[in-house]
Image: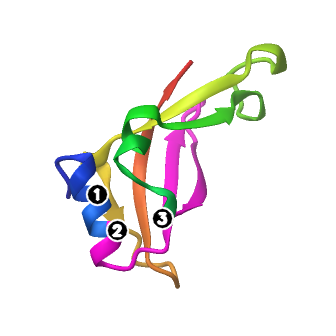
Amino acid sequence: MFKSASEVVKFIKENDVKFLDVRFTDLPGVQQHFNLPAAMIDEQFFIYGQLFDGSSIRGFQAINESDMKLLPVPESGFIDPFRLEKTLVIIFSVHN
C-alpha cells in the first residue's frame, strides 16, 4: 500500500487515521500487537522505531537485557476494516 515513510505520514493526516496497530511476530510464531496514537507518527518514527521491553514476549530476552526496538515496514501497511476507529496496521521487524 505504501512505498515510503512519507507516504504513510501523509496518508495518516489526509485520512484522519486515529491509531497505528504495531504488529510483530514472536519466536514461537504468534503475532503480537499494541496500538499507538496515529498523531505521534512522523518520518522520524520510521528511522528510530519504537522501543519496547522484550522480556514480556515469549522467547525474546531476559529482564536484564530486554531493551529492544521495533522498526516499521511501510510496505506492509493496510487499514483494519474491523476497527471502530480508523486504524492503520503496520508490520514491524524486531531488533535487539
Per the image, the residue denoted by label 3 is: 38
* Residue 95 appears left or right of 55: left
Secondary structure beneath label 3: helix
Tell me the distance, in whole angstroms, between the alpha carbons under discs 2 and 1. 6 Å
Question: Picture coordinates of residue 79 (x, y %)?
Answer: 35, 69
Per the image, the residue denoted by label 1 is: 8
* 3 or 2: tag closer to the N-terminus: 2
Query: Is-magenta flag for residue 20?
Result: yes
The foreground one among 4 and 33 is 4
Q: Amino acid at mark 3?
A: Ala
Secondary structure beneath label 2: helix
Q: Residues within 10 Å of mark 2 (few under 14, many from 20)?
A: many
Q: Residues within 10 Å of mark 1 (few under 14, many from 20)?
A: many
The foreground one among 56 and 68 is 68
Question: Picture coordinates of residue 91 (x, y %)?
Answer: 41, 46
Q: Say if 53 sits above or below 82 in the image.
A: above
Q: Residues within 10 Å of mark 3 (few under 14, many from 20)?
A: some
Q: Quick one: which residue is furthest to the right in this view?
A: 63
* 1 or 3: tag closer to the N-terminus: 1
Q: Are marks 1 and 3 in contact (CB under 8 Å)?
A: no
Per the image, the residue denoted by label 2 is: 12
Q: Are marks 2 and 1 in contact (CB under 8 Å)?
A: yes
